[in-house]
Image (spheres, grey):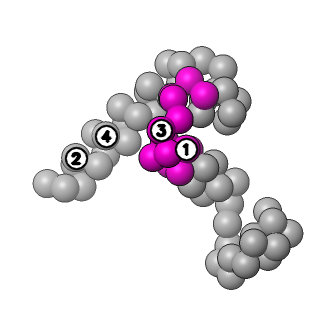
């Protein structure tokens, strides 16, 4: 990750979690299907991403209150 972030000009530390999240966010906002994103990230089971999305939505709503 250090080599990649330096090559693209990112000064801050980047973890694989952050890189995967950024990739999926950009892809989703660009109109990619959930199925494509999950396959690209190696999520072989759709339920995995559905559970993550449900958790994130609940966590986000809790923070907004």
In the image, which disc is placed on residue 41? Answer: none
Picture quadrant where residue 4 is located = bottom right
Residue at which label 3 appears: 31
Residue at 60% over, 49% down: 23
Disc 3 crowd, CA 10 A, few/some/many (<14, 14-19, 20+): few
Q: Determine the residue located farthest toward the left in the rendered image.
A: 65
1 magenta-colored = no
Disc 2 to disc 4: CB gap under 8 Å: yes
In the image, which disc is placed on residue 27? Answer: 1
Question: What is the distance, in whole Å, between disc 3 and disc 2 at their CAs?
Answer: 24 Å
Give the camera-side residue of 39 and 43.
39
Question: What is the distance, in whole Å, between disc 1 and disc 4 at their CAs?
Answer: 18 Å
Picture quadrant where residue 18 is located = bottom right
Disc 1 to disc 4: CB gap under 8 Å: no
Residue at 82% over, 73% down: 7
Q: Which residues are magenta?
A: 24-36
Disc 1 crowd, CA 10 A, few/some/many (<14, 14-19, 20+): some
Q: Is residue 64 above or below residue 31?
A: below
Give the camera-side residue of 25 and 48.
25
């Amino acid at each position: 990750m250090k080599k990649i972030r330096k090559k693209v000009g990112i000064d801050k530390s980047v973890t694989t979690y952050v890189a995967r999240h950024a990739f999926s966010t950009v892809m989703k906002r660009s109109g990619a299907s959930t199925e494509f994103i999950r396959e690209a990230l190696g999520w072989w089971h759709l339920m995995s991403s559905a559970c993550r999305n449900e958790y994130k939505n609940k966590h986000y709503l809790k923070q907004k209150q």
